[in-house]
Amino acid sequence: MAQGTVQVTHGGASRWRRRSGEYPTLAAALAVAGDGDVLSISPGTYRENLVLHHAVTLRGPEGGLGSVRIAPLDGVALTVRASAVVQDLHLEGQDRAAPALLVEDGAPELTDLRVSTRSAAGIEVRGTGARPLVRRCTVENPSGVGIAVLDGGGGVFEECEVLAAGQTGISVRGGARPRLERCRIHHATGAGIGVTGEGSGLEALGCEVYEIKGTGVQIAARATARLTDCAVHRTTADGVTLDTDAVLTLAGCDIHDIPENAVDLRSRSVLTLSRTTVRRFGRNGLSVWDPGTRVDADSCEIHDSTGDYPAVWISDGAAVSLDSCRVHDVPDALFVLDRGSRVDVVDSDLSQVRNTAVSVSDGATAQLDDCRIREAATGAWFRDHGSGGTLANCTIDAVQTGVIVTKGADPTLERCTVTSPAEAGFYVSAGGRGTFTACRVTGSSGFGFHILDGCRTTLARCHTERCARGGYEFPEDGPVAEDCTGDESAARPAARAASGGSFAGAHAGVRTVAAGQSPVLRAAEVPAARPADRPDGGVATATATAPTAAAARGSGEVLGQLDALVGLDSVKREVRALTDMIEVGRRRQQAGLKAASVRRHLVFTGSPGTGKTTVARLYGEILASLGVLERGHLVEVSRVDLVGEHIGSTAIRTQEAFDRARGGVLFIDEAYALAPEDSGRDFGREAIDTLVKLMEDHREAVVVIVAGYTAEMDRFLTVNPGVASRFSRTITFGDYGPEELLRIVEQQAEEHEYRLGEGTAEALLTYFTELPKGPAFGNGRTARQTFESMVERHAGRVAQLSEPSKDELTLLFPADLPGQPAPC
């Protein structure tokens, strides 16, 4: 039974019609209403199924949203078949097979409606003639779709909100093409926005999709969409997916806090991105699969991965183009695999990459022009036969190794520069090929070009300078080298000259030779190299390997640096005890006595930021200073470096990581990730089995340290019967206390020439005591971040002073702490 009354104000001029009147039901009022009439509805609940055939205005009391409820027991609450105006109503539906509000024709204006329903759809727009303008409407439908636009329908939705949809928040299919402006879709179970079917399309401007139990945006089956200045975040599945010839454009969008792939494309889909940011994703930032699938990105940024997967994954013949983009703070930047897969990168930055910036394997191709790679373990790695491409005019800085070429890969590098690598600038092994033209290596802690036996590599007009172990290291029957120069005294003499070419060292004493001759480096021709005394009384030749950086310091000096670390008292005792055992064993052997066997492999347990990597690096230096390890360098890897995607690739990756660590320490962070609790067909156990065998076969060549959270590492040690037996002891790194965190800040301040002002130390103690110690707490990293934040706040304060004093330039005060109000 209806409650309230309906007043009809007629807009027509016919004399036979009353100009106004009151009716007990909406149906009665609609029966007499015509185009232009206004139906003003009194507050109440109306159990009626309404159908608008005329261009009437149907409205509730102004400012009384929710006071008029249209709530039939079944069927559609409101059907619109004309260019009517509907405003300030609350619609409810209970029919699982019908929508609460259905627009079938016309261009109605629907304003300030609240649709709270448990029906098939909250609002449904159906048919080619349906083009509503929907403003400031809210749809809540825990049982079905929030808004469905179907069968050629369209319309504009402005400032609407879809919340708590039991299925897709906004569903577009059957050739429909709506436009969304400043809409919010959240707390849907299913996709936030779904567009599917040939001819279907969507344009969204300034919209937000978040808190979705599923995928944020799905485009599929030849549908198209364009999102401008939109945000997609906090989903439980992928952020954006494209499948089967889907086409999507993202302009000025922000996709973040996604636990899976931020964007996933398959089956000939095409994605165009401009000025778009992808950040904080758990798997891939861009995951691109299948022949014909393509991504074109311009002026985009991909950063801050929260997982162990490459930022950009390209496989199965897909292609990606990046122009003026930035990829940073990720495990791997670009990972291209499978024949036909390709990445083209122009004028882009790849930085702060924990593993490999550009990885090319299984016949894939990478083309990089005018790019900058810095702060990565490996700049670029061409892994196997058929893999290649071109790096031109690229700079690679502050990496472990600049470029690695292995297993028959054959890239071309032109006018590329590697600066300050910790190991080699360019490293070719395992039958790798490659052509290097006008490439340079400067300031390497290892070799400039290190090319192993059996690698058919070509070098032309390359140059090296200030390389600690030498500019060029390769066998006599090695690469073709033409017009290459270097200034390193430790340069190796084994190179093969190309026809009519030469291999010359401007200051290293390498003689220019005729075609077919091998250049010879003689000790007398190297004035910069002082021969070192050998233990046997002879003189070392100029071809002897230069001492490594790790062996340059004595064990006492390195132990002194260990003692200088804040806290870690039990760790220091463990390392000293182990060092003493090794040192005494060495002296007993020198005295002709038996030495106790000391297993040097270790397990480090504890929270992040407690100094595990730092101690591992110092431990390697100590062992090198004692002559136990040849170099003592640290090679840090994680699951992504060891576990492959295909059968057999894991053993190869693990072997390669182990080989890079020969003579030093292989540090495996979060080692428990190699053995997930629900492993299924996971290849991590293959990495563990391979590692155990390598540790046994080459027990004197590499020290292995596995690290991670305490409980997870306890489980890891039970996975393989041989794992626990390979490690001599477990060293636990406790969390830093407030006093130790304060000491780290004080050290940072001293190092950067700042001082703590009056009361600042006490304020820091209070701050660290009250700071939540949840999973995101970074221990020492938190202390350093706190200091950096204080310096930023200090700069903002001091920059306002016209002539600051020295004290003002150096003193940090309690107001500079994070979260404190700015000082007056």
Image (tube, rainbow, N blue to C red):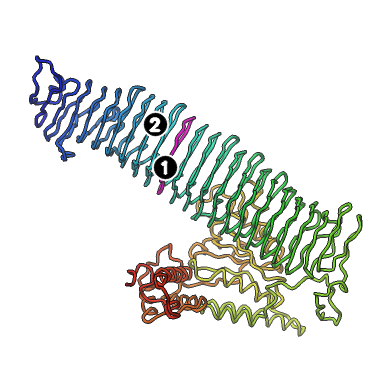
Q: Residue furthest bottom?
A: 591
Magenta residues?
Answer: 219-235
Is 367 on the left or on the right of 66, as rendered?
A: right
Is 413 on the left or on the right of 676, as rendered?
A: right
Q: Secondary structure at mark 1?
A: loop
The residue pinned by badge 1 equals: 216
- The location of residue 445, given as percent across then percent down, is 69, 68
Residue at 88 percent across and 62 percent down: it is 512
* Amino acid type of the residue tagged 2 in the rendering: Val
- The location of residue 172, given as percent across then percent down, is 39, 31
* Amino acid type of the residue tagged 1 in the rendering: Gly
* Magenta span includes 333: no
Q: Secondary structure at mark 2?
A: strand
Q: Earlier in the sequence, mark 2 or mark 1?
A: 2
Q: Residues within 10 Å of mark 1 (few under 14, many from 20)?
A: many
Is 647 on the left or on the right of 90, as rendered?
A: right
Mark 2 in CB contact with mark 1 (< 8 angstroms): no
The residue pinned by badge 2 equals: 172
- The location of residue 343, given as percent across then percent down, is 62, 44
